[in-house]
């Protein structure tokens, strides 16, 4: 609807004396009727014209009428009196449209103009001459939906940025697609993609029983075997097989009775079995009931039940190259994640067991080219659905498990695929806590694992975020990903292909039926079969569809990157990013949130979580960690830090134990994953060899017959996995605590601990090293007692070990060095209660330098060997300082010390400039600074790991 209102325009001899639109005129909303021009007489203010009497909203005059100015208050357009006429003594304003009273004829309305940014004003005839001698016109007010500019309403702007087809939002089109493409056919709106059926997708034979989450195994005769899963009425024990020669499904009997289906037959949460064909040709099935398993013989169509294995539901069951089958991961009905794993040997009719590193269920696994099995992804927390962070390797030859490199992001409900060159893709999944609560974030992230190095890196991101999908490696080497649950929580039909050479994903023909929790495999005849699953309505599916991958039509045109990909490209780990995608569209992308007292960009690094530090320092929070013990920190070959620290065991191992976590800094933030479970709550040592390999040390409990020892354990990164070994003889018994480690000139480790086997006052300082035959030997250094922190260890270029530690009985700082005849001990400082939490470093000449605390005077002190004597000095004496200091020497041999201000609970840093000590408060938050670990990079920049509402990291300017 439009409104007619009055507009005054003054034109006198080509000049405008003007009267504006009244302030109380609200344009653009009325009854749609025009206001007529004025009449010819006294209207008493009710004629509908330019009314007066002060109430008509017209043009004010001398007095209070709103009409043209006259001599009094006649209520009309009159003169002195109430003549009611249109003419008086030459001053009536000439409302007849004539040319009296100085007006020219009013026949030229002004051009349209913009009343405001959203309203266009158009003046029209007839015009009339106002009392001020100017022409006045009626006006038409038109609202402009897309704005007003230059005297015209702006046209609808087509919404075609990043779109090559479909509706432009203005009733037009952004373009059309050539056959056989269709707009949005590949899964992205506004992008030309293959239409339904492109690539020869066609309906396949339907299952005998609709099911989701079935167990599947490819049989040696080319058939696909399905068993178990969920139906519309609950769990099923039926089985069937697909014959690609006849394109038919045939029943294969049912899993025999035996075992109790947890929670009853209708409990959908637990009813996901696993299956694998053994070397004998039989199929092993388990995970469907308590302590039960069964074997199916495809040759005879018969089932044989079995029982007696550890209860596990939703297990990972994989065939091994040696003809056996691996049964791993899973969860009990009580919610405990199962660490005990089995391999089944059908020839010997025997189960062998081993223990995996981390508890998880709904895991993904694949056999590597060398016969080992990679297990990753899955859920590590049955309460919140926390995605598992680690990756493990199972070695069938040694029947052992070990951690390998961890993916950069946690993944649950992801897909795993081994490429033809032996590398492994980890595809999509949910990336944060909330798998059950519905707050899970589905990801487009894809990571590539190299078994030769044991490390992961990002590769091309998916176009569509998804979880619960399948990944099939095709005969030509490409990887086909189909279906799943999309970012909005809805089941999707979208299909993508991964090109190994270009490391890119291309959208192609979608499934005819959207599905998740399904089965996909490439048959011997080259076709890909997709079957079973969950529909968008939640129903179990019986339908199947097949495709010849060689006939796929790729999507073309502009395909915008996913949010994940854009964040990774910009190295953004938090905040909202305004970035232009590949289609030229500027998008607002959320890259995550910060926690634990940090903010996005708070450390001065855009789109990174952190907090401001003093004097140009950057402070970042790694995450939750166990305080009270010292972490380890090193700089890796890429110049970024790695931090090792203990945290509570989340792997379901039971008992009050911890795990050693390794956190690595990368372009978007930090990623952390366990590298050893079952350790004790002691400090963790970390070192880097001359070849760049990491070594870590912690303490753990080992059991020998009826007794237990708490011993140091060495963790070594070797051949793409973490190897662990007890770094001590197992007899006599030890009770290791307060651990430290150093590496010799040929990278041989020296591990030293305070041993608590006797009593606190007589606790011994023991060191462990390998002898010439590779056996670990124990060496007693001293009996300094247990109170005062861990010893500090360094090995000089001649291979001689040096120790610095606190003797609680003498309340003194001690230095020890081992020569050809044994250990030499000397008291460095006994001036007060000094030496706690000593930190030792050796300079280029092999001279020791030590930072330590003076507990009597509450000071930070520093000692150095000059070559002939010890030089002692107080470094910081302000208030109560010097808590848990850490020392490092730069290339010039100058000391750098990180320590806690115990008065304010801040992290402080001191460095010797060559002439004086320089001090900086790195973290003034009042919650941080304890148990710091310090290292310097090749440029001399300091890197500090410490505790303060979680584990923190500070990077020097």
Image (spheres, helix red, strand yellow):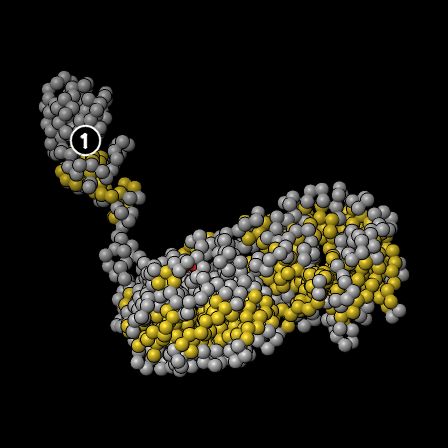
Query: x and y percent of residue 160 in the render?
Result: 31, 60
Residue at point 29%, 74% (across, down): 205
Query: Is residue 22 left or right of 31 when viewed as pictured?
Result: right
Query: x and y percent of residue 217 in the render?
Result: 42, 74
Residue at point 87%, 60% (across, down): 825
Quadrant of the rendered image containing residue 51: top left
Query: Is residue 794 left or right of 151 when viewed as pictured?
Result: right
For the C terminus, the quadrant is: bottom right
Q: In the image shown, does 540 or 32 lie closer to the viewer? A: 540
Tell me if residue 561 can be seen.
Answer: no
Label 1 CA crowd tier, 10 Å (few <14, some 14–19, many 20+): many
Q: In the image shown, does 275 or 866 lie closer to the viewer? A: 275
Q: In the image shown, does 571 or 627 lie closer to the viewer? A: 627
Query: x and y percent of residue 621 in the render?
Result: 59, 53
Query: x and y percent of residue 247 in the render?
Result: 30, 78
Taking 20 as reference, is 890 above or below it?
below
Q: Secondary structure at mark 1?
A: loop
Query: Is residue 605 left or right of 49 when viewed as pictured?
Result: right
- The residue where tag 1 is placed is 130
């Amino acid at each position: 609807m439009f409104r007619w209102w009055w507009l005054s325009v003054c034109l006198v001899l080509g000049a405008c004396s003007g009267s504006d639109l009244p302030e109380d005129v609200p344009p653009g909303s009325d009854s749609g009727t025009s206001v007529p021009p004025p009449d010819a007489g006294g209207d008493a203010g009710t004629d509908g014209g330019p009314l007066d009497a002060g109430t008509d909203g017209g043009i004010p005059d001398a007095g209070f009428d709103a009409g043209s100015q006259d001599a009094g208050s006649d209520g009309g357009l009159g003169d002195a009196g109430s003549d009611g006429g249109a003419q008086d003594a030459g001053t009536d304003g000439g409302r007849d449209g004539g040319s009296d009273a100085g007006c020219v004829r009013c026949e030229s309305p002004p051009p349209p103009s913009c009343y405001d940014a959203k309203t266009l004003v158009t003046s029209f005839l007839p015009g009339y001459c106002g009392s001020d001698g100017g022409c006045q016109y009626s006006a038409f007010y038109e609202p402009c939906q897309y704005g007003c500019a230059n005297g015209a309403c702006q046209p609808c702007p087509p919404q075609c940025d990043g779109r090559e087809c479909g509706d432009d939002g203005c009733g037009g089109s952004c373009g059309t697609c050539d056959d056989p493409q269709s707009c949005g056919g590949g899964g992205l709106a506004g992008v030309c993609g293959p239409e339904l059926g492109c690539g020869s997708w066609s309906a396949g034979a339907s299952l005998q029983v609709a099911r989701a989450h079935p167990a599947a195994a490819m049989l040696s005769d080319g058939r696909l075997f399905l068993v178990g899963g969920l139906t519309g009425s609950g769990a099923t024990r039926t089985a069937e097989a697909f014959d690609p020669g006849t394109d038919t499904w045939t029943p294969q009997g049912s899993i025999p009775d035996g075992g109790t289906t947890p929670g009853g037959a209708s409990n959908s949460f637990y009813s996901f079995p696993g299956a694998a064909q053994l070397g004998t040709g039989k199929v092993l099935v388990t995970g469907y009931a308590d302590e039960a398993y069964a074997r199916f013989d495809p040759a005879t169509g018969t089932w044989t039940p079995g029982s007696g294995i550890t209860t596990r539901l939703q297990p990972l069951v994989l065939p091994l190259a040696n003809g056996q089958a691996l049964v791993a991961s899973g969860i009990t009905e009580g919610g405990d994640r199962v660490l005990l794993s089995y391999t089944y040997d059908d020839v010997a009719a025997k189960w062998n067991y081993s223990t995996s590193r981390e508890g998880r269920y709904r895991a993904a696994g694949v056999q590597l080219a060398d016969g080992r099995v990679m297990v990753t992804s899955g859920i590590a927390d049955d309460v919140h659905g926390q995605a598992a962070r680690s990756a493990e390797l199972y070695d069938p030859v040694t029947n052992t498990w070990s951690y390998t490199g961890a993916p950069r992001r946690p993944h649950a409900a992801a897909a795993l695929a081994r490429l033809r060159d032996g590398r492994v893709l980890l595809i999509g999944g949910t990336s944060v806590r909330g798998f059950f609560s519905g707050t899970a974030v589905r990801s487009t992230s894809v990571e590539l694992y190299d078994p030769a190095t044991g490390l992961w890196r990002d590769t091309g991101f998916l176009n569509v975020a998804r979880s619960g999908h399948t990944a099939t490696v095709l005969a030509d080497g490409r990887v086909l990903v189909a279906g799943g649950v999309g970012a909005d929580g809805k089941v999707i039909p979208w299909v993508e292909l991964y090109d190994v050479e270009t490391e890119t994903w291309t959208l192609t023909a979608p499934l005819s039926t959207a599905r998740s929790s399904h089965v996909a495999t490439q048959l011997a005849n080259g076709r890909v079969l997709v079957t079973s699953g969950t529909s968008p309505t939640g129903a179990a599916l019986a339908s199947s569809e097949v495709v010849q991958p060689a006939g796929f039509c790729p999507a073309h045109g502009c395909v915008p990157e996913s949010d994940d990909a854009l964040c990774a490209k910009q190295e953004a780990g938090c905040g909202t990013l305004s970035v232009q995608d590949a289609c030229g569209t500027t998008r607002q992308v959320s890259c995550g949130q910060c926690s634990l007292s940090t903010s996005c960009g708070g450390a001065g690094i855009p789109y990174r979580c952190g907090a401001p530090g003093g004097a140009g320092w950057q402070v970042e929070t790694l995450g939750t960690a166990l305080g009270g013990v010292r972490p380890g920190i090193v700089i890796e070959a890429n110049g970024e830090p790695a931090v090792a620290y203990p945290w509570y065991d989340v792997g379901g191992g039971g008992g009050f134990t911890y795990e050693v976590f390794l956190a690595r800094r990368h372009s978007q933030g930090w990623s952390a994953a366990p590298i050893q479970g079952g350790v004790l709550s002691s400090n963790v040592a970390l070192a880097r060899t001359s070849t760049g390999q990491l070594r870590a040390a912690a303490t753990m409990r080992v059991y020998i017959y009826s007794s237990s020892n708490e011993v140091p354990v060495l963790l070594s990164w070797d051949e793409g996995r973490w190897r662990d070994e007890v770094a001590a003889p197992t007899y006599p018994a030890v009770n290791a605590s307060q651990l430290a480690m150093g590496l010799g000139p040929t990278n041989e480790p020296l591990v030293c601990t305070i041993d608590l086997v006797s009593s606190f006052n007589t606790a011994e300082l023991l060191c462990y090293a390998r002898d010439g035959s590779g056996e670990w030997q124990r060496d007693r250094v001293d009996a300094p007692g247990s109170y005062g922190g861990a010893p500090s260890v360094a090995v000089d270029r001649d291979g001689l070990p040096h120790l610095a530690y606190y003797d609680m009985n003498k309340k003194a700082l001690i230095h020890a060095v081992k020569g050809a005849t044994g250990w030499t001990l000397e008291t460095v400082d006994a001036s007060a209660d000094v030496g706690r939490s000593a930190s030792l470093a050796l300079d280029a000449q092999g001279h020791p330098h030590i930072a330590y605390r003076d507990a009597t005077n509450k000071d930070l002190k520093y000692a150095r060997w000059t070559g002939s004597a010890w030089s002692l000095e107080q470094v910081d004496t302000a208030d109560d300082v010097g808590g848990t200091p850490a020392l490092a020497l730069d290339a010039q041999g100058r000391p750098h010390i990180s320590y806690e201000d115990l008065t304010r609970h801040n992290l402080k840093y001191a460095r010797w400039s060559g002439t004086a000590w320089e001090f900086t408060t790195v973290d003034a938050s009042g919650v941080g600074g304890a148990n710091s670990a310090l290292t310097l990079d090749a440029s001399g920049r300091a890197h500090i790991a410490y505790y303060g509402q979680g584990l923190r990291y500070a990077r020097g300017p």
